[in-house]
């Protein structure tokens, strides 16, 4: 009697009757794909087909309304003046971060992004990358708040991770001597060094500098990062190096066969040249020694800012303060030395007593 009772259909199996009156069985999860099952239920063939259908990858959840997603918000942000006004290097950096964010969470509603999610994103990255992530997301949500897309900025109050670092190591005079011994005049590497050293430009600006920027011994160029225009005197050592070359047609810095270089490509090639010379430092460290030399030469904060394209006084003041401390230390050392040295007249009297 028990065998005659109808069996309950397994989970996700539906029974349908065709127009000819025949019973059909289908496997379907939610609104996913319908999979036809054998008609002979129950049977070993039916059970096998059912288990195979059940083992298939479950259907993806329904996509949210694209207008409500984080991916949509990011795309709108990319189109704004707020984003487009960034320097090219900053845009590339932030765009790479936003691409990763969209890849991982772009299908989520942007209204669901909370402070907790921002903190998780920050803490999942190394400190240096975490700072850039936070700046990028803060820019996105501050714009979204102003535009009325969100009621609150989830990045508000989230602290930037502290990174204990003095930044790029400053080159020393000994480093420069080692590099010049390895790369003599007439090599492109010597041109690279002197353009960076005697202009103080960042890599992105240094690779663009050419004869078209120079007039009456002054190189004038708009900097990529800050948009400021700097005026740089072409010092005799730099002019001599450029005259000997090799240089490119539109840029002093060039690669093989005079080809121009990108900022990233130049950075990699310059680091290799440094390694070959036994100098384990970067191009940015040359900008620092230029600032140190300028400060030690007595340039004011305003003069250093005009030369290096800084603003706000903070960076220039750092170097002038360091130079002042060095001068004060040297002066103090000289005073201590004089205070502990016998007076010339005293030494003469002592010598006369010894001779008597």
Image (cartoon, rainbow, N blue to C red):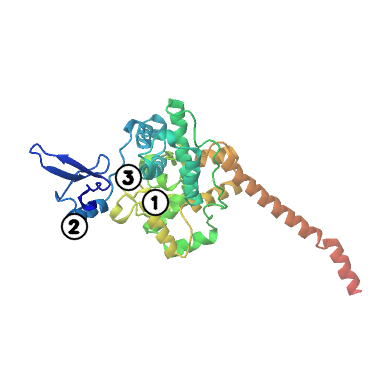
Residue 71 is situated, as x and y percent measured from the top left of the image, at: 35, 37
**Above/below status of 153 relative to 286:** above
Judge left or right: residue 260 versus residue 218. Answer: left
Report which quarter residue 320 is drawn in: top right
Q: Residue furthest front?
A: 1
- Whether residue 200 is visible here, answered yes or no, is no
> Alpha-carbon distance for marks 2 and 3?
78 Å
Q: Secondary structure at mark 3?
A: loop
The quadrant of the picture occupied by the C terminus is bottom right
Closer mark to the observer between disc 2 and disc 1:
2
Is disc 1 placed on a helix, strand or loop? helix
- Say whether residue 303 is left or right of residue 181: right
Q: Position of residue 41 (x, y in %)?
A: 17, 50
Q: Label 2 belongs to which residue? A: 44
Crowd class of label 3 (few under 14; some 14 to 19; many from 20; radius 10 Å): some
Q: Is residue 191 above or below residue 227?
A: below
Q: Position of residue 35 (x, y in %)?
A: 18, 46
Residue linked to disc 3: 250
Q: Residue 110 location, x and y as percent? A: 41, 35
Structural crowding at the residue carrying mark 1, measured as other residues with C-alpha within 10 Å and reported as few (<14), some (14–19) or many (≥20)? many
Q: Quadrant of residue 69?
A: top left
Q: As drawn, which residue projects farthest toward the bottom? A: 355
Q: Is residue 232 visible?
A: yes
The answer to the question of whether label 3 and label 1 lie on touching residues, with beta carbons closer than 8 A, is no
- The residues tagged by marks 2 and 1 sit, at their Cα atoms, a distance apart of 85 Å
Earlier in the chain: of badge 2 and badge 3, it is: 2
Name the foreground residue: 176 vs 135: 135
Earlier residue among tags 2 and 1: 2
Instruction: Give me the disc on residue 242.
Output: 1
Q: Earlier in the sequence, mark 3 or mark 1?
A: 1
- Work out whether residue 181 or residue 269 is closer to the camera in this orientation and state it: 269
Label 3 vs label 1, nearer the camera? 3
């Amino acid at each position: 009697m028990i065998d005659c009772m109808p069996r309950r259909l397994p989970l996700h199996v539906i029974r349908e009757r065709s127009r000819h009156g025949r019973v059909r069985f289908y496997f379907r999860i939610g609104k996913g794909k319908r999979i036809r099952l054998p008609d002979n239920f129950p049977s070993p063939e039916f059970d096998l087909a059912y288990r195979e259908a059940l083992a298939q990858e479950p259907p993806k959840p329904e996509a949210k309304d694209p207008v409500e997603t984080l991916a949509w918000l990011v795309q709108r942000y990319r189109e704004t003046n707020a984003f487009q006004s960034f320097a090219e290097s900053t845009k590339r950096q932030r765009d790479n971060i936003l691409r990763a964010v969209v890849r991982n969470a772009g299908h989520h509603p942007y209204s669901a992004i909370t402070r907790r999610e921002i903190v998780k994103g920050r803490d999942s990255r190394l400190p240096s990358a975490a700072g850039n992530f936070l700046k990028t997301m803060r820019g996105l949500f501050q714009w979204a708040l102003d535009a009325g897309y969100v009621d609150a900025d989830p990045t508000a109050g989230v602290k930037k991770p502290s990174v204990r670092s003095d930044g790029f190591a400053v080159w020393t005079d000994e480093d420069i001597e080692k590099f010049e011994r390895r790369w003599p005049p007439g090599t492109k590497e010597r041109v690279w060094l002197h353009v960076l050293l005697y202009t103080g430009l960042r890599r992105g600006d240094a690779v663009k500098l050419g004869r078209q920027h120079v007039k009456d011994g002054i190189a004038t160029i708009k900097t990529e990062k800050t948009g400021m225009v700097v005026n740089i005197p072409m010092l005799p050592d730099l002019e001599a190096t450029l005259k000997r070359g090799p240089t490119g047609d539109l840029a002093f810095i060039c690669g093989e066969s005079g080809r121009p270089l990108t900022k990233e490509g130049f950075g990699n090639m310059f680091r290799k040249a440094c390694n070959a010379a036994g100098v384990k430092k970067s191009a940015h460290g040359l900008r620092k020694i230029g600032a140190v030399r300028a400060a030690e030469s007595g340039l004011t904060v305003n003069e250093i800012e005009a030369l290096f394209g800084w603003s706000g006084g903070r960076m220039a003041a750092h170097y002038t303060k360091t130079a002042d401390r060095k001068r004060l230390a040297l002066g103090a050392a000289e005073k201590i030395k004089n205070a502990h040295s016998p007076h010339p007249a005293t030494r003469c009297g002592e010598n006369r007593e010894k001779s008597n």
